[in-house]
Amino acid sequence: MAAGTVSGGKSDAARSPGWRLLIEALRGQRKGLFIGMLVALGWTAVRVAIPTLIRLGIDNGVQGTDPLWKWSAIIVAVGSLSGLFMGLRRFVAFRNARMVEARYRDRIFAHIQRLHFSYHDTTATGELMSRANTDLQQFQNVVTMVPITTGNALIVVAVVTVMMIVNPILALLALIGLPFVNVLGRRFSQKLHPAVLGVQRESAELAGVVEETVSGIRVVKGFGAEPVQSAKLDVEADDIFNQATDVARIRSRYLPAIELMPNLGLVVVLAYGGHLVIEGDLTVGELVGFNLYVFMLIQPLRMLGMVVAQGQRAAAAGERIAEVLSTAPSIVDPARPRELPTRAGAGTVEFRGVTFGYETLAGPDRTDPPPVLRGLDLTIAAGESVAIVGSTGCGKSTVARLLPRFYDVDSGQVLLDGIDVRELSRHDLRRAVSIVFEETFLFSGTIRDNIAFADPDASDEDVRRAAELAGAAEFIDEFAHGYDTELGERGLSLSGGQRQRLAIARSLVADPRVLVLDDATSAVDPTKEHEIRDAMAEVMDGRTTIVIAHRPATIALADRVVLMDEGVIVAEGLHSELLATNARYREVLAADGGDADLEKASA
């Protein structure tokens, strides 16, 4: 009865991805659940014995000739054993739940990291955080209840069996409300599930607003936009309130009736059982024991509503978790990945007829935007440095994202040392290609941890060498704790130039054959740019390097300059040649770097 009520029937469980995931989780914890059920069985046996002992104590100890202390001692001993089993049952229940939570949290976290960039482009961070935390907690709560619910179900079966043996007519009268409890439980389950799913969805949207506000707190404060974010939060909070009110309304409609029905049986037992005692057809001890059994039925049946509610919350949470886990990564390793050639002379990059466009929407509403790259052809020799220049939206950053296979091309090929990047394992490819992004992101931890992020086992000498190449060693040595200096969140305690140099050092620890500098100086004060440029010049020496830049002085570091416009290459050559001969090149530099920078570079 309870299982069917909670799940809403086998057909509902078969249809719902949340229930399927929950059943999968329970199967994965079979051993722990089996132990929990054995403990629940022992607890049930002890609990069911207590009313019988009380009956015998009254009939033989109070009204009979047996010493009362004997029955009292037996009841205390059995009661103590019941408490021991109860504690053990709860320990096993919570242990099972935490193991399920840990296993699925690891699984969700690993899967989120495997998912392609386009998925993260269209999915809010707060949404993912909600599914990996709040939803997972709801999911594991139902695992906690399995041994507890099993014990309650065994109590119901055992108590009903004993009652039928003692007095079948009295037992039937006591159980008169059970069919109504079952009907109410089913209706409660059907109405509660969509309402609970709505609460989970609105909670995720609220988490998204909070995550965006905290992450962008400097922008919020900088524009005095606290009221704007507060208004957004109020809207989401009101939505949660409305959904939660619907849930509370459903619970208040059904739970009182579910709790009332077992108590009706108690009234009937007292009335009819008392009559039997008066008539001499039932002993006082048997009536007291029978009433205790009815009392034992009330709590399990009362918990039925909580079990149903928790089951529906878990199913709703499981449905949202299943949505993430069922999303297949679009960027995967080939079945038999090829190996890159030996390091000597390595680092040749080729783009052959590459066409690519970003997805804007997923699912049935997906649209096909115009391509960012249109048949791009570009070859970069090993050890050569090439600057890619163009106006905003021309596709230059897309080139940097296609090389390490953050996205796959729509048509054409991207090759590293003559091998299509889709034929390489992502690990090998991304160890061979390092990117310094325009937006520098540092992690909480020490400076050393951040530099050695991709290779935590890197030696101190490798870390220091990378810092020296990036021009970061000097300012690191000025800190009291040097490389063990703890950085705050995102490294915002450092200047923009310092963060950028640490990012360059981080990219060098793996000694990549290709280095991509994606607007690495855009966030740096122009007066300090020369410090980054000096570090970049040393890093680029003899290494295949793609420089995406706007500032002429940075562009001039490259051996060759490629000018892009509307997804294709329109000109290439030396910086000085293009500056002198190509009007479009001068327009791009003037628009991005300012006329003063252009005149300085020309001089």
Image (cartoon, grey):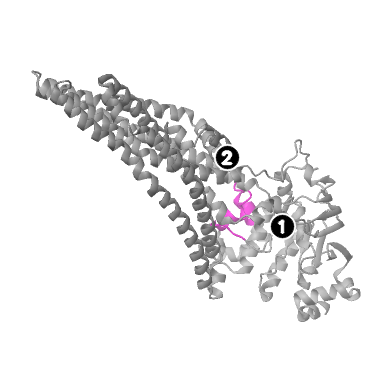
Q: Residue 104: x, y in percent?
A: 53, 41
288 relative position to 67: left or right: right
499 relative position to 45: left or right: right
Between 380 and 292, the one nearer to me in the picture: 292
Residue type at tag 1: Thr
Q: Quadrant of residue 179?
A: top left
Tell me which segment is drawn in magenta: 441-465
Element type at marker 2?
Answer: helix
Q: Residue 114: x, y in percent?
A: 65, 45
588 relative position to 529: left or right: right
Residue type at tag 2: Pro
Between 26 and 337, the one nearer to me in the picture: 26
Residue 464 lies in the magenta-colored region: yes
Point 65% across, 56% down: residue: 122
Q: Residue 118: x, y in percent?
A: 69, 53
**Is residue 59 shown to the viewer in this render?**
yes
Disc marking residue 17: 2
Element type at marker 1?
Answer: loop
Q: In this view, does 597 lie above or below 126?
A: below
Residue identified by numbered label 1: 360
**Is residue 133 shown to the viewer in this render?**
no
Q: Which of marks 2 and 1 is in front?
A: 2
Q: Residue 476: x, y in percent?
A: 58, 63
Point 72% across, 67% down: residue: 534
Between 532 and 305, the one nearer to me in the picture: 305
* Cα gap from disc 2 to disc 1, whole angstroms: 26 Å
Q: In which quarter of the image is residue 498?
A: bottom right
Q: Report crowding for label 2: few under 14, some 14 to 19, many 20 or more residues within 10 A (C-alpha).
A: many
Q: State the count of labels.
A: 2
Q: Is residue 195 above or below residue 220?
A: above
Point 22% across, 23% down: residue: 52
